[in-house]
Image: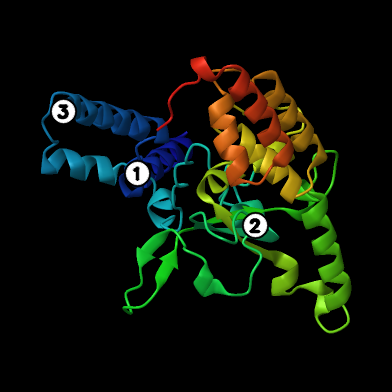
Amino acid sequence: QQQQQQQQQQQQQQVQTARAVAPAPRASLSGGSRRASATLASRQEHLNAGNPPSASQSSRLDDSRYTSSRSSNSYQPAPPIRPNSRYDGLEDDELNWRLDSYASLSDYTIVVNRARPGPYAPDFDTSDISAIEFIGANSSSGGGVMPKSDVYYVHKAMIAVGSRRSELLGRRIREAENTSRGGVPDGHSSEVNVHETVMLESAADAMGIVLDFCYYPDRALDINVENAVALVYLGQRYKIRALLEQAEAFVMENLESATAMHFLLDSYLYKLDDVCARAIDVTAANLAETVDFV
């Protein structure tokens, strides 16, 4: 019995010694998370109230984060996504001649120089540039005039293919490509890709309407009394059959006493003999009702 008592006393002494040597228990993970959440909530309340958190509160919040979170400094938040942004940097615009040449992948350029009426009007088919009175500003070098030019970045497939195509431009493009393929790779040259011309101002104003007519086969022609004769001329010059038919039909349907003088002057300017003759007949038959255009 004495030996048993001595053994029990030794075991109790060992247990007490082990408890004295053992470290204090660590705070549980959930307890630390609760303290961090409480500190974060306190900080948010200060922000909502317009007061920044104190330095001690910020220090306690920072100390409550995990070591692994502090070491992950390589993480960067994703930048905000801009609305309507595209990988190629372009918008979802329908193909048309008004777009930038880079955006629309234009492969053909039309340059229209404006000129006043003269002996070579309306086609200005002459190599003597000095005989043409261009519309524009005086040259900064002191001599001549810098023509006022309209530049259109278009597409060969839209102006030279289809029922509303320009037969003139289509033929010129194909002939230039066939000629240049022998010496220029892929047929790329200035003759193939650029058409520069001279027009009277009213025809130049109507050029955008002609391009819309070629680009949009389901869209009605934007024609009125002011531009009708110019559209007839452009239809003839560029050999756009559908445009010529619709423009001529509009002129004949609207040729009356109130419009006859306007059609007469424009058709004389563009040397359209058929329209001019019709306008003269209507003007003569209604001479007393003719509006004074002077």
- Dot 2 crowding, Cα within 10 Å, few <14, some 14–19, many 20+: some
Q: Amino acid at mark 1?
A: Arg
Q: Are marks 3 and 1 in contact (CB under 8 Å)?
A: no
Q: Amino acid at mark 3?
A: His
Residue 236, visible in the rendered structure = yes
Q: Quarter of the image containing the C terminus?
A: top left
Secondary element under disc 3, as helix, strand or loop, is: helix
Where does label 3 land, which residue? 46
Where does label 1 land, which residue? 65
Image coordinates of residue 144 in percent, x first then y, are 40, 74
Q: Amino acid at mark 2?
A: Asp
Where does label 2 land, which residue? 123
Image coordinates of residue 105 in percent, x first then y, are 67, 56
In the picture provided, is 90 more to the left or to the right than 238? left
Q: Nearer the viewer, residue 111 or 122?
A: 122
Q: Nearer the viewer, mark 2 or mark 1?
A: 2
**Pointer 2 or 1: first along the chain:** 1
User: Could you tell me how far apart the alpha carbons at marks 2 and 3 are, in whole angstroms?
Assistant: 79 Å
User: Could you tell me how far apart the alpha carbons at marks 3 and 1 are, in whole angstroms?
Assistant: 20 Å
Secondary element under disc 2, as helix, strand or loop, is: loop
Mark sitting on residue 79: none
- Dot 1 crowding, Cα within 10 Å, few <14, some 14–19, many 20+: few
- Dot 3 crowding, Cα within 10 Å, few <14, some 14–19, many 20+: some
**Pointer 3 or 1: first along the chain:** 3
In the picture provided, is 81 more to the left or to the right than 268? left
In the picture provided, is 187 more to the left or to the right than 31? right
Q: What color scheme is it?
A: rainbow
Image coordinates of residue 176 in percent, x first then y, are 82, 70
Q: Nearer the viewer, residue 104 or 172?
A: 172
Name the residue: 70% across, 36% down.
213
